[in-house]
Image (cartoon, rainbow, N blue to C red):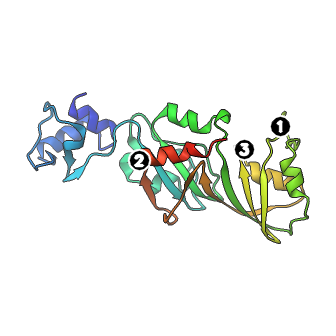
Amino acid sequence: MKLVKLIANLGYGSRKQVTLMFREGRITDAAGEVLYADDAVAHDQVRVDGEPLDPPHGLLLMLHKPTGYTCSTKDPGRVVYDLLPPRHRLRDPVLSTVGRLDRDTSGLLLMTDDGALLHRITSPKAHLPKVYEAVLASDLRGDEADVFGSGTLMLESEKTPLAPAIIEPLGPRRARITLVEGRYHQIRRMFAAVGNHVESLHRHTLGGLGLGELAPGQWRMLDDADRTRIFAASS
């Protein structure tokens, strides 16, 4: 692939804009030598304004999503892409969220431009555990573990029961929930089914991957070891 197209696909600008970057000498090799649009250079040797190129197709990153942001490119309010470098939003193939966290849910969110990887992570066959912490409006009534773990709980408008989920009380109005599926607003609807309301919800882990030291709004690229950790916890 020609350098102009490669760099444009990574979101640094249109082909016309990237061509201008070459003319301005902003694209160099690792040694600082100015590159030209028709040069053949390895991806990891290219620099834009002195910085290495973003990873090629296959990028996977983890974001600590704050509340108030949506997993969308069209929402008129704040979206998770606002927390990333602007070029990430312009990548081709597109950078997509791996599943969604709603506006009022915080925590671990993965994003990738690899459709096959996205499908592998979100597929029900993966059985990847997802661990959340919920703060509730009312005290736990005591039978939630039996109800959520039964494998028979039906949510309104659903045609199949939920897979068994694990709930661990952390206090009168706080609980840790582990799911292996991800239906629409699932935890909120589960607690609604037992007469409670979720006031706040935070995802701590997905598969074997946790947020670590990432603060709300921060993100980092994931490497091969991280990818292995994701699937290490599948059942």
Quarter assignment of residue 203:
bottom right
Q: Can you give x and y, in whole percent of width and height, for residue 83 in the image? A: 46, 57
Between circles 1 and 2, the one closer to the viewer is: 2
Q: Earlier in the sequence, mark 1 or mark 2?
A: 1
Residue at screen point 60% across, 61% down: 67
Dot 3 amino acid type: Tyr
Asked if 171 appears above or below 197 in the picture, the reply is below
Residue at screen point 24% across, 42% down: 44
145 or 109: nearer the viewer: 145
**Is disc 3 surrounded by few (<14), some (14 to 19) or many (20+) residues within 10 Å?**
few
Label 3 sits on residue? 184
Helix, strand or loop at label 2? It is: loop
The numbered dot on residue 137 is none
Asked if 95 appears above or below 101 in the picture, the reply is above
- Is the N terminus in the top left, top right, bottom left or bottom right quadrant? top left
Dot 1 amino acid type: Glu
Q: Can you give x and y, in whole percent of width and height, for residue 153 in the image? A: 87, 44
The numbered dot on residue 158 is 1
- Alpha carbon separation for disc pair 1 and 2: 37 Å
Q: Earlier in the sequence, mark 3 or mark 1?
A: 1
57 or 228: nearer the viewer: 228
The numbered dot on residue 223 is 2
